[in-house]
Image (cartoon, rainbow, N blue to C red):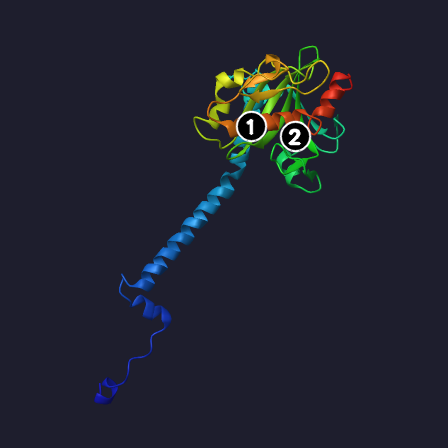
Amino acid sequence: MSEEQNNLPEPAKGPIARFMALPTDSVPKTVFVAVVLCLIASMIVSAAAVTLRPLQEINALKDKQVNILQVAGIYDPDADVVESFAAFEPQVLELSTGTFTDEFDPATFDDRAAANDPETSVALDDDPAGIVRQAEYVTVYLLRDDNGDLDKLILPIHGYGLWSTLYGFIALEENGNDIYGLQFYEHAETPGLGAEVDNPRWKALWNGKRLADDDGTLQISVSKTVPAAGNDYHIDALAGATLTTNGVNNLVRFWMGESGFGPFLENLKAGDI
């Protein structure tokens, strides 16, 4: 090789070659590795979320059905949930008229989606339950006895407590006034305080209480003291959880009143259901 050839400059390197030539612990290589790892991890998480979504939806539906069975007092942990739930007759109810509608399929109607859709909900000016918007239609569940007569009503309720919206069900006897039970299946209230809404002893207090007096006036109360209407309409407040107690009181009275299931319960008492 001639001396002139030895003195020729080295050919320019491309960006990839220059990057590869950097030390392993250089800043560009460190950032590159971090970005690549984040991208790979995000793709794995996204793929897992998409893959598992149907299973999550099935589990969420099953959990909801278990809670309905429990509040109705017919849950058997050894029985198939789907088979047990078949005892219920779901119906989509139009709240304003208190009558059932065939405009929606009860098997697929989504109460929460309806509450967020301006086409099927209304914004509330008077909002004691703190729900902001109220769906015009909700799914209710009828439980009939062996003769086909109405045994219990399971009505969905929700409202704001201290930290979260509490979602649950209230079970009424066939007369639409006597309470069989109340149960929340989703909330984020303070453990040991507001979360005591899940305490079996507190939930048992609801059994046998009444919503309204003989004149039809709504009297149910969740409070520290017994109301003037008497103990038949009173559930003790949660100890140390005043705001959650107030939230439960407000949401139950809202949903059991004229703005909620009141028209439906009146139709029931009149024999129109």
70 or 216, which lies in front? 216
Q: Give the residue type that dot 1 points to.
A: Asn
> Within 10 angstroms of label 1, few (less than 14), some, or many (20 or more) residues?
many
Up-down: is 255 above or below 124? above
Q: Which mark is residue 272?
A: none
Residue 128: horizontal and vertical position, in percent?
A: 62, 32
Q: For the point 39% across and 57% down, which residue is it?
A: 35
**Looking at the picture, how far across and down is residue 183, in whole percent?**
55, 23
Residues at marks 2 and 1, CA–CA distance in whole angstroms = 33 Å
Mark 2 vs mark 1: give the one in front.
1
Q: Would you place residue 41 above or below residue 163 in this image?
A: below
Image check: 233 left or right of 240? right
Q: Residues within 10 Å of mark 2 (few under 14, many from 20)?
A: few
User: Which image quarter holds the N terminus?
Assistant: bottom left
Q: Secondary structure at mark 1?
A: helix
Q: Which mark is residue 107?
A: 2
Residue occupying the point 61% across, 13% down:
230
User: Residue at coordinates 66% horizontally, 28% vertically from top-left?
Assistant: 139
Q: Give the residue number, with chain letter if any, for mark 1.
A: 246
Tell me where residue 28 sits by quadrant.
bottom left
**What quarter of the picture does the C terminus occupy?**
top right
2 or 1: tag closer to the N-terminus: 2
